[in-house]
Image: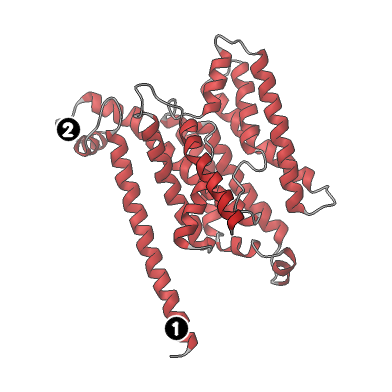
Amino acid sequence: MPQEHVEIQNEALQRRRYRLLMLGMLAFLIAAVLFSFWVGYYPLTPLQVVQAFLSRLGWRGDVLPQAVTIFWNIRLPRILSAVLIGASLSVAGAAYQGIFRNPLVSPDILGVSSGASLGAAFAILCGASNGTVQLAAFLGGVAAVSASCLISRRSAHSQTLSMILVGSMMMALCNAGVTMIKYIADPNDVLQQITFWLMGSLTKTDMDALRWSAVPMAIGLAVILLLRWRVNLLTLDEEEARSLGINVRRDRLVFIAASTLLSAAAVCLGGLIGWVGLMIPHMARALTGADYSRLIPASAMMGAAYLLLMDDLARSILAMELPIGVVTAVMGAPFFVWLIIKRREA
């Protein structure tokens, strides 16, 4: 059998396996969503979920008013927020790992999380409303990444290395600002609010906050998903990529901008939720391989389901609800240690 024919058959087999994998992930995500409605002090059965949803469409069946209120005002915004945040952080992490050619890179490598924390902490210190805090966090994250990119362009060293170094500096600077704000904040009120926000939580999410954050998330996801095949080219050496006609600087900035929208919107909606953007791309890579045209959609699916289950764990493991950022850190830290040991052995 000719070698070319064998390669065509292998590619067709891989596509078939990838479709089955994505269908399986979609089915698992739907099951996780239905399970999440059931988790909590007031469990909602699948029948109650359907009845509560249809009640807004004019259905006049026998449904408890409490179920309708819990469905629309508490569970649905929280579940959708977990799905969008998980998908956004995972896609941003996968994109960053590709364009920086480093599997240990996470979405906050350029300071987006630290900048968002500084913006949110300053807004809370000024007594701003929840919507203003959310806006300040988003603007802080975008400003930190923008500063990292602008400063790195003035460097005489490699742009990739300069971005990482300047991003580390920006994270340290913003973290120092957050520490200063916590130092001068009222310990009986403001300090508690800042600390709670920094731990990450979906407790206060509602449909208004979700609608506001969904816009930049949708833009960032659309850009990365449509151009995801170009990440494969950015993983090449810069000289080799330029020889193929690729504008490396332009494409890198496009993906950084889209990933910043995803990360900043995710942080301003749920606070600091770490490790998702580092862990999930590696888990997806083990299933799909290193082709980013397949890796990024798989990361989105896995990230959405993962964070949804972590949120279920955070609000059910103890009598009081745990901050989801704490739960993801407990799960992520051992994974990071394993990843470092594995790379050293390799």
Q: Position of residue 256 (x, y in %)?
A: 64, 49
Q: Counting residues from the N terminus, which is met first, the one under dot 2 or under dot 1?
A: 1
| Secondary structure category for the residue under label 2 | loop
Q: Which label belongs to residue 157?
A: none
- Who is closer to the viewer here, 7 or 65? 7
In the rendered image, residue 145, in percent from the top left (x then y), is placed at 68, 41
Up the image or down, 235 lies above or below 270; here it is: below
Say which amino acid is labelled 2.
Arg
For residue 215, say whether it is visible: no
In three-dimensional space, the C-alpha distance between marks 2 and 1, rounded to whole angstroms, equals: 59 Å
Question: If the image is split into quadrants, where does the N terminus sit?
Answer: bottom left
From this view, report whether residue 88 is shown above or below residue 223: above
**Relative to the observer, which residue lies in front, 157 or 247?**
157
How is the structure coloured here? secondary structure
178 relative to 190, above or below: below
Specify the amino acid type for callout 1. Answer: Val
Query: Which one is nearer the viewer's eye here, 282 or 223?
Result: 282
Looking at the image, residue 36 sits to the left or right of residue 179; the answer is left
| Residue that numbered label 2 is attached to | 60
Identity of the residue furthest to the right in this view: 156
Q: Residue at x 37, y 60 (%)?
A: 21
Q: Are marks 2 and 1 in contact (CB under 8 Å)?
A: no
Question: Could you tell me which secondary element the residue under label 1 belongs to?
Answer: helix
Q: Residue 174 placed where, x, y %?
A: 69, 30
Q: Residue shown at 78%/54% (left/top)?
A: 158
Residue 55 in which image quadrant: top left
At horizontal 61% and vertical 35% (from top left) the residue drawn is: 113
In this view, the mark in front (2 or 1): 1
Give the residue pinned by disc 1. Answer: 6
Quarter of the rendering occupied by the C terminus: bottom right
Q: Residues within 10 Å of mark 1 (few under 14, many from 20)?
A: few
Residue at point 70%, 70% (across, down):
245
